[in-house]
Image: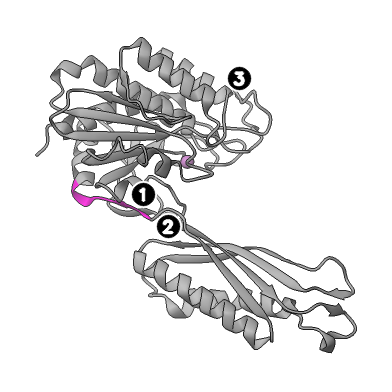
């Protein structure tokens, strides 16, 4: 595939976005290109997604990872190759990630005889909705991988710029749910019930003190209560109130602290109003921590190839690329894709000019790391 064919492939994937664990057509398209080019596809048993392998066994093993899923967003980009599926859109650039790693696979295949080791290319399903990374890791096909490299589109850099930053680059995105139970009553007779609403309101405010009073001011962390629901009408005190939200942290110890503090504050606040609380924690993936030495190496390669290294903004967004990094070190790399809108926006766009250079970069990086000590 030449540069133009890669762009056509990208536009086709863009026009046919599929949500997490439904990436059947996308997987088919990827497999078709891999097979046409004689690239080995490992027997992963994955229903959607795939793992390709290039190069001989016996040397080092390096993995390149992309994600393939789209978002439940109605596209408003106005592109000629905009989504043909109502309510679904590649609004996070995973179409571009898929195309870049496919392009890298094709370049590595051309150099297969020269490769001193093996590159595994992970086409991961369901990054957005569920933990697709865990499903891929459960195949057992990545146990020999020594380093992982991931890609993400970054609209705030033009094509030709990369973000390669050591240390934490994405947060651990945990969720929680709290149900406060009181006793319903007539709104005119609050003394006959236990109103869960003041308890929920108080808890909403108290939760912020966990950050402002409990956290090291130099450690970023977020508690957001995003869903607060109680009652059905104006003259009835309800039985219960529901709170949901997310906690974002970069350090494992902060994650442990906030989880326990939130539970303590929820239970004790409810109790102080005579109510009870049930606390449920929904563990997300860990924070993405880029390996410092590997970042240095990747930056050198990028600069040799003429890429700019941009100063990327920090984010408390989450990414299940971190699951791979629990097994081996790696780097999550931002690729400048231009555009005026943020990821997940209905008008998010990727400049296709970013694709071929990024494919060359990841292929070169993987090959260089195969030869590294
Ligand atoms: Ni994404």
N-term mark: 3 or 2? 3
Q: Is residue 106 left or right of residue 91?
A: left
> Where, by quadrant of the figure, is residue 353 drawn?
top left
Residue that appears at 13% across and 29% down: 58
Residue 28 appearing in the image: yes
Span colored in magenta: 287-293
Q: Secondary structure at mark 1?
A: helix
> Where, by quadrant of the figure, is residue 357 drawn?
top left
What is the number of the mark on residue 322?
Answer: 1
Instruction: Please determine whether, in this image, residue 192 is positioned above or below residue 62.
Output: below
What is the number of the mark on residue 186?
Answer: none
Q: Nearer the viewer, residue 48 or 138?
A: 138
N-term mark: 2 or 1? 2
What is the number of the mark on residue 80?
Answer: 3
Do tag 2 and tag 1 residues touch (Cβ < 8 Å)?
yes
Residue 188 x, y percent position in the rendering: 90, 83
Residues packed near mark 3 inside 10 Å, few (<14), some (14 to 19) or many (20 plus): few
Residue that appears at 30% across and 48% down: 325
Give the alpha-carbon distance from disc 3 to disc 1, as whole Å.
35 Å
Residue that appears at 51% across and 45% down: 130
- The mark closer to the camera, 3 or 1, is 1
Q: Which residue is mark 2?
A: 172
Instruction: Please determine whether, in this image, residue 233 is positioned above or below residue 327.
Output: below
N-term mark: 3 or 1? 3
Q: Secondary structure at mark 3?
A: loop
Residue 323 x, y percent position in the rendering: 36, 48
Residue 56 among those drawn in magenta: no
């Amino acid at each position: 595939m030449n540069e133009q064919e890669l762009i056509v492939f990208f536009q086709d994937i863009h026009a046919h976005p599929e949500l997490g664990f439904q990436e059947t057509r996308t997987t088919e398209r990827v497999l078709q290109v891999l097979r046409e080019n004689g690239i080995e596809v490992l027997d992963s048993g994955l229903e959607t997604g795939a793992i390709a392998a290039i190069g001989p066994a016996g040397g080092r093993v390096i993995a390149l990872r992309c994600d393939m899923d789209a978002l439940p967003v109605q596209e408003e980009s106005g592109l000629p190759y905009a989504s043909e599926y109502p309510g679904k859109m590649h609004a996070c650039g995973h179409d571009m990630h898929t195309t870049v790693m496919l392009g890298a696979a094709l370049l590595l295949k051309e150099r297969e005889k020269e490769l001193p080791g093996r590159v595994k290319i992970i086409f991961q399903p369901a990054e957005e909705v569920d933990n697709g990374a865990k499903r891929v890791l459960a195949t057992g096909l990545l146990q020999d991988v020594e380093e992982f490299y991931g890609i993400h589109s970054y609209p705030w850099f033009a094509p030709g710029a990369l973000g390669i930053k050591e240390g934490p680059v994405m947060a651990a995105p945990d969720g929680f749910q709290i149900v406060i139970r009181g006793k319903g009553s007539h709104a005119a007779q609050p003394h006959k019930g236990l109103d869960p609403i003041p308890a929920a309101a108080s808890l909403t405010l108290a939760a912020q003190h966990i950050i402002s009073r409990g956290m090291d001011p130099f450690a970023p962390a977020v508690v957001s209560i995003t869903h607060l629901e109680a009652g059905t009408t104006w003259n009835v005190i309800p039985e219960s109130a529901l709170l949901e939200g997310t906690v974002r942290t970069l350090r494992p110890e902060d994650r442990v602290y906030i989880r326990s503090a939130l539970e303590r504050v929820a239970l004790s606040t409810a109790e102080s109003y005579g109510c009870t609380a049930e606390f449920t924690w929904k563990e997300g993936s860990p924070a993405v921590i880029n390996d410092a030495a590997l970042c240095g190496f990747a930056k050198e390669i990028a600069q040799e190839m003429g890429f700019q290294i941009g100063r990327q903004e920090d984010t408390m967004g989450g990414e299940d690329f971190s699951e791979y990094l629990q097994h081996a070190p790696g780097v999550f790399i931002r690729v400048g894709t231009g555009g005026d809108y943020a990821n997940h926006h209905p008008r998010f766009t990727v400049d296709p000019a970013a694709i071929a250079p990024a494919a060359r970069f990841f292929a070169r990086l993987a090959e260089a790391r195969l030869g590294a000590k």
